[in-house]
Amino acid sequence: MKLLVSALLVAASLVSTSSTQSPPNIIFILADDLGYNDVSWHNPYIHMPNLGALAEDGLIIENNYVQNNCGPSRNALMTGYYPHFSGLQGPSLRTLEPVGVPTKFKFLPAYLKDLGYQTHGVGKWHLGFCHPDYLPSNRGFDTFNGFWNGGADHYEHSLTAYPSDPSTIGFDFHQNEDLDFDVIGTSTSRVVADRVGEIVWEHVGINKTAKLNDLTNYNASDPFFIYASFQDPHMPLQVEEKYTNLYPDEQDPIRKNYLGMVSRLDEAVGQMLDDLKNITYMSEEDGQLRSLLDDTVIIFSSDNGGWSEKEFGYSGGSNLPLKGSKVDTLEGGTRVPGFIWNSGRKGSTMDLFHITDWLPTIYSGIAGGNAENLPGDMSGFNQADLLSNPDGKSMRDEVVHGVMDFTNTSFTMDFGQYMPVSVVNMTGAYGGALRFEDWKIIKGCYTFMGCVQNYGVTEDPDVIQLYNLAEDPNETTDLSADPQYAEILQILKDRLQHQFDISMKPLRVDEGNAGSPVNMDPQVYYTGWCDSIYEAEPQ
């Protein structure tokens, strides 16, 4: 029978490999566009009782880095590689872009299935759907309930293929590969929480509405992995009044709606926790009453910083005191809230962590997999020592915020009313950023509009910036011109250039009409309108 997870933590392994003990259940909660300043442990004004309690009782990862927008972060999480190794660097996949994460990459749930885990995905996908090979059910998930694109109406679960053309609207919510119209009218966060509840109750073999009894069908050696990929607080800003009422002093109506969505996300997490707490059983090991929550490791992260810049892309998020916004390679776009609960270590750590680290950490450090089964060139590190040992240290000294070379790649995107220019041209964009120890280098364009070639504020691809993040975490003082830092600047230049040199050629392709919802009756998103790609080509 499964024992308390924290009792199993030794040295650099989060679980024992003893045959008498089973690996824990794992729930990975991913928020969408949640800013550094939008969680209760950084900002006490935020109403977040459930996630806040987990964070305070777990290990808060203060230097928790991700990519600077939605799709690339999900790519990094599922593959364990930086997105520039799959050819999907730069902006997130567009709705009708005929590509997905190349099939050479084995995803996290597929690795966990090899270890006997039941694997379930719920919520947002955003890793490609134009070919069945790209769908969750073919990337390792036993079940998937959610939407394939990057965002949709929170209640109607529909979006336009081209924002400038409302007639291209289509429904996007699926149960595995089948359409699920039953979710219409229910917020995405509630749908995610309800589905997670169904999964955990089905896992123990009893109906949630039935009277609790002995879990005679409960097999502790049959753990589950749930990827709870929320849409909150991503645009569009749609939320019930009961959540915005939690912020009576907020005068900015946009931020007020955004914060309401943050609290809706937290309430959904609370519902999930209640389901785990309410499933109890008597341990055969010590005769003590235990809950499924005791047997579960919970991981939380945002996928990128909040969309915080009021000049462009503002959706109410805040990354203060960090500089920058979602889609920037500044700290505000890439350093986000994150924690792990029930890993054996509590408190907080300032050690470096990147979203690519979760795959090897979960597989080898939590689930008990053999690290030799993972590719040797994976970007991520097994950070089990950091997460379980009070004196544990990070395995990494470098984080790549992103590299993008569209010098020879033609790529445009339709954003309609959401951008200062309705169709943005990324052809020729060039920029990258990297942190090494306490130092950070930025080369070329580092904001979204600065990378856009047809807006008029294009950031020079040859300009270099250098920051000491230990002394200047908010990136206020550029040290690149100071001769006393010439040596460290050259070291970082070389390290960043190496990432450009080994990156793959971008797979990015302009959208077409193949896959448009207008091709279906009723108008829905569907698969099977492109060829799948095994791997990208070298740059």
Image (tube, grey):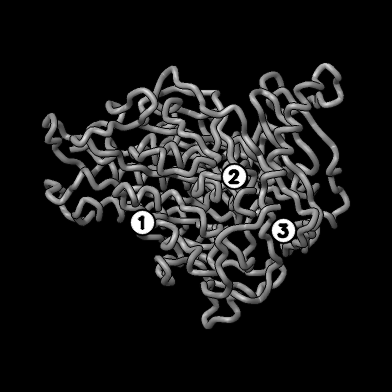
- Residue 70 is labelled as none
Task: Look at the image and tell me in which quarter the N terminus lies.
Answer: top left
Query: Mark 3, mark 2: which one is toward the viewer?
Result: 2
Judge by depth and name the residue closer to the eye, 15 or 164.
15
Q: Which amino acid does label 3 sit on?
A: Tyr
Determine whether the residue tagged by mark 1 lies in a helix, strand or loop: helix
Determine whether the residue tagged by mark 2 lies in a helix, strand or loop: loop
Question: Disc 1, disc 2: CB below 8 Å?
Answer: no
Q: Percent position (x, y) of residue 392?
A: 45, 21
Tag 1 residue? 195
- Residue 418 is labelled as 3
Pointer 2 local density, CA inside 10 Å: few below 14, some 14–19, many at least 20: many
Q: Percent position (x, y) of residue 8?
A: 28, 28
Tag 2 residue? 82
Q: What residue type is labelled 1?
A: Arg
Pointer 3 local density, CA inside 10 Å: few below 14, some 14–19, many at least 20: few
Residue shown at 35%/46% (left/top)? Answer: 272
Question: Disc 3, disc 2: CB below 8 Å?
Answer: no
Task: Determine whether, in the image, residue 303 is placed left or right of residue 280.
Answer: right
